[in-house]
Image (cartoon, rainbow, N blue to C red):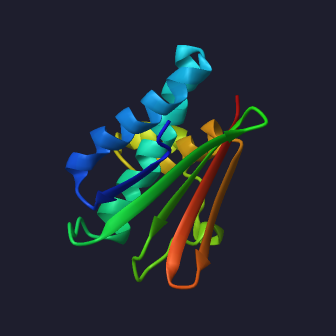
Amino acid sequence: MKNALRISCSRHNLKVVRDFVTDYLKAYQLPDLQLNQIVLAVDEVVANLIIHANSEDESQHLDLALDVSNKQFGIEIFDDATSSYAPSTYHEPDLQEYIRQGRKGGVGMTLVNRIMDRVEFSTQGRRNVCRLYKQL
């Protein structure tokens, strides 16, 4: 089973990523809810990297690698953007206030942090790495 994928930084590749994760995880016969939550979390991080970190520059690429070990799903997402996400600067929004204001957007990382068991952002050399983990 292939567990690596390289995509250009285009929104059009979000479906490719969702299908890649879904197809990989089907072998583990997860409940639909858990499968869809994992796919949503990966989609949100990849969308953020494509849109915000790489400005939808199709000459830039993301590399994804999936693994399941000891019943734990893990994904690594690598990019070469000059800016990197700093989780220490992230403040979870007041969702009730967002709803009251009718705001859209800005809650993706909140969803990711609630869905996944562990979320890590780091830099290795000149590459940014996001790692997501979920116990299956």
Indicate the quadrant where residue 23 lies.
top left
Q: Residue furthest right?
A: 70
Residue 107, image x and y in percent?
A: 47, 47
Total marks shown come to 0
Q: Is residue 19 left or right of residue 112?
A: left
- The quarter of the picture where the C terminus appears is top right
Q: Residue furthest front?
A: 1
Q: Residue at x 50, y 84 (%)?
A: 126
Residue 84, image x and y in percent?
A: 49, 75
Q: Is residue 73 left or right of residue 50?
A: right
Residue 126 in sight: yes
Residue 107 in sight: no
Q: Residue at x 62, y 46 (%)?
A: 113
Q: Nearer the viewer, residue 88 or 61?
A: 61
Q: Residue at x 60, y 60 (%)?
A: 91
Q: Is residue 96 left or right of residue 13?
A: right
Indicate the quadrant where residue 73 lies.
top right
Q: Nearer the viewer, residue 97 or 78?
A: 78
Residue 115's place in the image compared with 28, above or below, is: below
Q: Nearer the viewer, residue 91 or 24?
A: 24
Q: Residue at x 68, y 38 (%)?
A: 134
Residue 135's place in the image compared with 121, above or below, is: above
Q: Is residue 67 left or right of residue 103?
A: right
Residue 28, image x and y in percent?
A: 61, 22
